[in-house]
Amino acid sequence: MQQTPHSMTAEDSLIAVMVAVSASDEKITSAELVTIESIVNHLPVFAKYDPDRIKTVSQTVFDLFGVEDGLDALFGLVRENLPEPLWETAYALACDVAAADGELQGPELRILEEIRYELNIERLHAAAIERGARARHMTL
């Protein structure tokens, strides 16, 4: 297997986590895409980010999903390129994307659990982040 070169930035790592959650159930919804776009356009952490990179980062995630141990490789890249103070941010963004379409199915729940584990998110902090995402995505 050819080694994929990487030059992921911290912002790329955040994008990769969001795309991974969206793609985890093998269907990326419009609501999830709009949420990712909105996050990139509005959050200060993405102020200097080139949104044209989203496609490249997304393709990297899709490529990794297609190989054995790809998810482990993805989390390795994220841990390597995302400063630890932003690990909770990555989890919060992942929860927002997962909640965006109003449906949390098995694959999304499993990848959120994996993100919590891989990024060492304390259970109480994770519960608060999840509660906030649920509150932001409620409908009448």
Image (spheres, grey):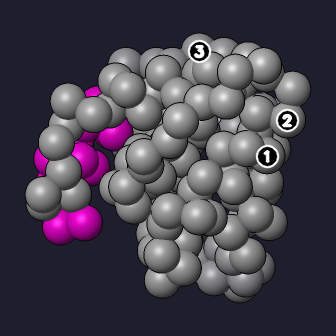
* Residue in view at x 18 percent, y 51 percent: 49
What is the crowding at mark 1: few (fewer than 14 residues within 10 Å), some, or many (at least 20)?
some
Residue 47: percent from left, percent from top: 13, 60
- Relative to 36, say whether 4 is above or below: above
| Mark 1 residue type | Asp
Please state the horizontal and vertical placement of residue 25, each as a whole percent of the image: 69, 23
Query: Which element type, helix, strand or loop, lies under badge 1?
Result: helix
- Which quarter shows the N terminus? top right
The residue singled out by tag 3 in the image is 27
| Residue 27 covered by magenta stretch | no
Helix, strand or loop for the magenta stretch, by majority: helix
Task: Say above or below: 16 vs 33.
Answer: below
In reply to whether residue 42 is colored magenta, the answer given is yes
Instruction: State how far apart marks 1 and 3 are (Cα).
Output: 21 Å
* Amino acid type at image mark 2: Asp
> Where in the figure is residue 2, as x and y percent of width and height?
70, 21
Is residue 132 placed above or below 31 in the rendered structure?
A: below
Which sits in the foreground, 44 or 4? 4
Mark 2 touching mark 1, by CB under 8 A? Answer: yes
Q: Secondary structure at mark 3?
A: loop
Q: Which mark is residue 72?
A: 1
- Which residues fall within the magenta stretch? 33-45
Q: Which residue is mark 2?
A: 69
Q: Tell me the SS state at disc 2.
A: loop
Q: Which numbered mark, 1 or 3, is in the foreground of this view?
A: 1
First of labels 2, 3 by sequence position: 3
Q: Residues within 10 Å of mark 2 (few under 14, many from 20)?
A: few
Tell me: residue 16, above or below residue 29.
below
Residue type at mark 3?
Answer: Lys
Q: Quadrant of residue 115?
A: bottom right
Is residue 76 visible in the rendered image? The answer is yes
Of 115 and 139, nearer the camera is 115
